[in-house]
Image (cartoon, rainbow, N blue to C red):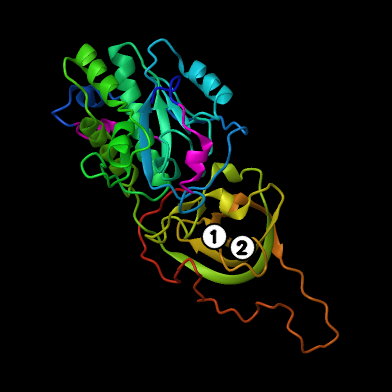
Amino acid sequence: MKMHKIVLTALATLGAAGVLSLSTTTASASSKVNSYISNEKITPAKVTKSIWGGFPKNKYRHGKAKPEGVVIHETANPSSTIYNEIAYMKRNYNNAFVHSFVDGSRIINIANTDYLAWGVGFPGNARFVQFEQVEVHSKSAFAHEIANASWYTAYLLNEYDLKPNNAAYDGKGTVWSHGSVAKHLGGSTHTDPVGYYASAGSKYFGQKYTMSMFYDMVQKYYNAMNVKHTKLVSAKYTSVNKQAKLSSKYKKFNLYNHVKNVSKNAKRQKWSKISPKVGKTYYIDMQAKKSTGQTWYRIRTSKNAKTRYWVYSENLTGVKNVPAKTTTSSSSSASSESTVPTSATSSTGASTTETSSVSSSN
């Protein structure tokens, strides 16, 4: 996307309304860039969160945190730096902005990817997470940038439960160049990053780099992210009626829909789903003791909340029984949940019997 030339109006936009190295995989023999990344054991950069509060927050067409794919851009400015581009975008976001920027050393996320960006016009803005690549000027830098961009694309797909699908051929999929959006959906006439890829690939590797080659890298990183490295372990579940406060260490761990490594369907959830705040009280209706020794709790945001999530015990502090209700009748139950059976299952589908296996870490 030619960031300094494009003008996409907000009106058109609103109308739509753990890092793994590739060294363990074999790069495509048809791409010299991909082979270089593998042979040199290039490790993608970590994502730097630098969210700016000035960007507007508008939902995707299917709602908040529901993008349908990722659009890859390129700035078409050979003399700019990643920080210059970010500064320019903040000053001119009413014309256009994207979620993140990538170069040979960094992946910087500047806008909340749960909300749409203004980078490809209508109707694409309401469908995709979008990021820009800054032009780099050496063989090593270009290879690192491709590694960063393809890994970040895979990371975003994984984050939003989307599977890789190249949209270049039929306009249906999850991985898009700006050029593919323009061709299949309209809203723009830009073709990036195709020209930049071809030019830099030829200059530094003697071979044009293509979106098809880039997509190969996305698939490899995505597959590496979803390899199951641990076997399931067993856990003993007990119904409880407790409460606890969120620990200051909660960001070191993840929120799950099931107990990690106990259920094959366990998957990380966004902390935003429980409105996290250190010291906030959450209610516990079930405890799981893993065969490896770790304790997990199933929590809800209020006593009557239907949606529940699993957290490692280190996420909580001050675990204690919910105070019994004071009544004048001796026959009254001390706890409204005292009759919950120990074998109860939750809306998250946790069962009382799981397959035993080797121990695993949190």
Residue 213 as seen in the image, left or right of residue 284:
left
Q: Quadrant of residue 311?
A: bottom right
Question: In front: 32, or 18?
Answer: 32
Residue 218, position as x, y percentages in the image: 29, 37
Give the secondary structure at mark 2.
strand
Q: Are marks 1 and 2 in contact (CB under 8 Å)?
A: yes
Residue 275 visible to the viewer: yes
In what quadrant of the picture does the N terminus appear? top left
- Residue 308 position in % (x across, y down): 56, 63
Which segment is the magenta one?
7-27
Establish if 101 lies above or below 250: above
Q: Which residue in the structure is indicated by mark 1?
A: 309
Dominant secondary structure of the residues highlighted in magenta in the image: loop
Q: Quadrant of residue 238?
A: bottom right
Q: Secondary structure at mark 1?
A: strand
56 or 250: nearer the viewer:
56
Does residue 245 appear to the left or right of 15 in the view shown?
right
Q: Which residue is mark 2?
A: 300
State the residue at coordinates (37%, 44%): 69
- The question of residue 14 being in magenta is answered with yes
Which badge, 1 or 2, is on the more N-terminal residue? 2
Determine whether 139 is above or below 243 in the image: above
Crowd class of label 2 (few under 14; some 14 to 19; many from 20; radius 10 Å): many
Per the model, the C-alpha gap separating discs 1 and 2 is 7 Å
Q: Is residue 325 left or right of residue 213?
A: right
Does residue 116 appear anywhere in the picture? no
Name the residue rendered at 58%, 34% in the picture. 55
